[in-house]
Image: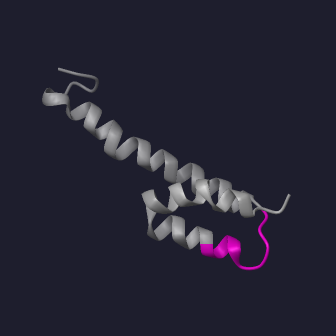
Amino acid sequence: MDLIGMPGGMGMMIVFFVLIPFTLWVIALVDCLKGDFSGDNKIIWVLVIIFLPVLGSILYFLVGRNQKIA
């Protein structure tokens, strides 16, 4: 038995493959929606984050956050 009581390390796999990406997705989406962007950048980033959840979230944190209006 492990973290969640599932045999064979399933609990850690669930945390790694479901919980962490979902948390990253939610944080990226909330941060994007709260930020101020110029033009249509906000709409584009929201669509990227929604339709490409893991990759879109990573791209947003690497590229999109720098496009916010200070």
Left/right of residue 12 with respect to residue 36 in the rendered view:
left
Residue drawn at x 44%, y 49% is 22
Residue projecting furthest to the top = 1
Left/right of residue 51 with respect to residue 40 in the rendered view:
left
Q: Is residue 38 above or below residue 14?
A: below
Percent coordinates x, y for residue 16 in the rendering: 34, 39
Q: How is the image coloured?
A: one colour
Percent coordinates x, y for residue 9 in the rendering: 19, 29
| Residue 65 or residue 13, whichever sits in front | 65
Q: Is residue 25 above or below residue 20?
A: below
Q: Which residues are magenta?
A: 36-44
* Number of numbered labels in the structure image: 0
Report if residue 50 lies within the magenta region: no
Residue drawn at x 77%, y 79% is 39
Quarter of the view holding residue 65: bottom right
Residue drawn at x 52%, y 57% is 57
Percent coordinates x, y for residue 30 in the rendering: 63, 55
Quarter of the picture containing the N terminus is top left
| Residue 26 or residue 64, whichever sits in front | 64
Percent coordinates x, y for residue 21 in the rendering: 42, 48
Residue projecting furthest to the left = 8
Quarter of the view holding residue 32: bottom right
Residue drawn at x 42%, y 42% is 20
Q: Is residue 6 above or below residue 29?
A: above
Quarter of the picture containing the C terminus is bottom right
Left/right of residue 18 with respect to residue 22 in the rendered view:
left
| Residue 21 or residue 63, whichever sits in front | 63
